[in-house]
Image (cartoon, rainbow, N blue to C red):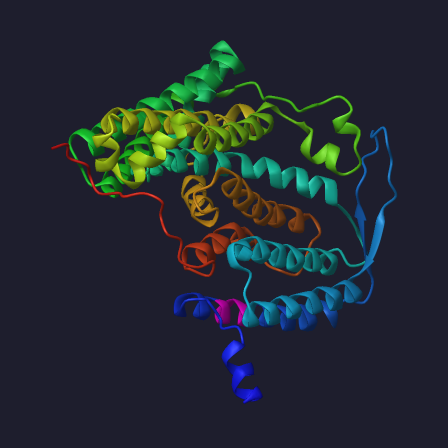
Amino acid sequence: MGNVTAVMTRPTDSRSPAELRRSRVLAIVYLVLALLVLWAFGFGSEGSATFVISRPGDAIRVGDISVPGAGLAFVVAAVLAFLGARQWMAGFGSKTNLVLAIGLGLVALSFLAWAADGASFSLVGLLQEAIKRAVPITFGAVSGLLCERTGIINIGIEGMLLGGAFTGAIVGSTLGATAAMIAAALVGGLLALLLAVLTVKYRVDQIIAGVVINIFVLGLTSFYTSQFLVANPALNNAPIMRAFGIPLLADIPLIGPVLFDQNIFVYAMYLLVAITTFTLFRTRWGLRTRAVGEKPRAADTVGINVYRTKYRNVIIGGLVAGFGGAYFTIGSVGRFDENMTAGRGFIGLAAMIFGRWHPVGAVSAALVFGLADSLQVKLGILDTPIPSEFLAMAPYLVTIVVVAGLVGRSRPPSDYTAYVKE
């Protein structure tokens, strides 16, 4: 009788079959990663890697950290094995993606220790570069989030980023950086208005409308670059927004140089994520936005103008993407090159999905992509035995992993069916 009672009172696994399958897959992934780290980095490292966490001009100097590659690999493998066992037994619930990102970060750290075996590596430089490369991805992700929260899929983010970059180069070369940022945002807003007219008024398929915008902007910017900017190099020589440190905060070891010694686009990214999070989930505007996306007919019955809300949010999303596109020119290299966004708009969409349509989740995912992107640059300096072509594939491989469903099927928060007012 006691055994029967124990069986009856034993807690059951409340996860659905789909969640159980995902937990099993992720658990296997963790275990495979643990074995890979042990084999490749644990038994393949002989010396120590030196991570530099201070710069020569920092007010507060911190000593470099020497990490034995093999020892770190064994620790990381043990942590991954634990995560795999925990994932198999009970899962991590809503924190699954966060734990996965941490696990991948540990693998990247062990990989860095292996790549920098016997050499020194600037950890500050790597993280600074990761944040910089996450900027356009974050702006693209937030742009897509603002649109999709009202039920409009914005595939045209890539074109809006590219249009903003092109405008930033020309206007920056003639009128300065401030005018370039404003003009780039306006161009993104105009392209978003086109998307809104096509999808809301004429009810064109949202995917097709976004693809049309991408092709249109790519063709237009490529034509004017080859026919106009090449013959007028003075119009493709924009000023670059230099980094500046925030007093006191920039002096904090490691964190200060990475987070608070950046250019205006990085600080704008911080503000964008904070403002979007607050307004989307703590204001009437955000409530109406989410209502229009989730239940447009119910929102219409309580007096919310569904069409106007969709137009407004899509245009705001375009302004955000256009501003983010200016980073490629006046925030980075000071000139425009054909197709220089290189798919960052699509990576932004993947970051939005990985972040579960939440601004904080989107920027966290963008940082993962930015880290993968910066790794291929930094590892090329270390002269690792990995071919540069494979290193260049890193951010796109991460994107494929995300959209292929490793992070689980993400349920969109909105109804993407074209709304027709009765």
Q: Residue furthest front?
A: 1
Q: Quadrant of residue 68?
A: bottom right
Which residue is rendered at x = 34% and y = 38% of the image? 148
Which residue is rendered at x = 50% and y = 80% of the image? 8
From this view, report whether residue 189 is shown above or below residue 301. Answer: above
From this view, report whether residue 29 is shown above or below residue 3. Answer: above
Q: Residue furthest top?
A: 175
Which residue is rendered at x = 54% and y = 65% of the image? 91
In the image shown, does 32 or 133 lie closer to the viewer?
32
Camera sees residue 342: no
Camera sees residue 119: yes
In the image shown, does 231 or 92 lie closer to the viewer?
92
Q: Residue 419: x percent and y percent? A: 19, 36
Quadrant showing the N terminus? bottom right
Range of the magenta residues? 23-29
Q: Residue 255: x percent and y percent? A: 73, 37
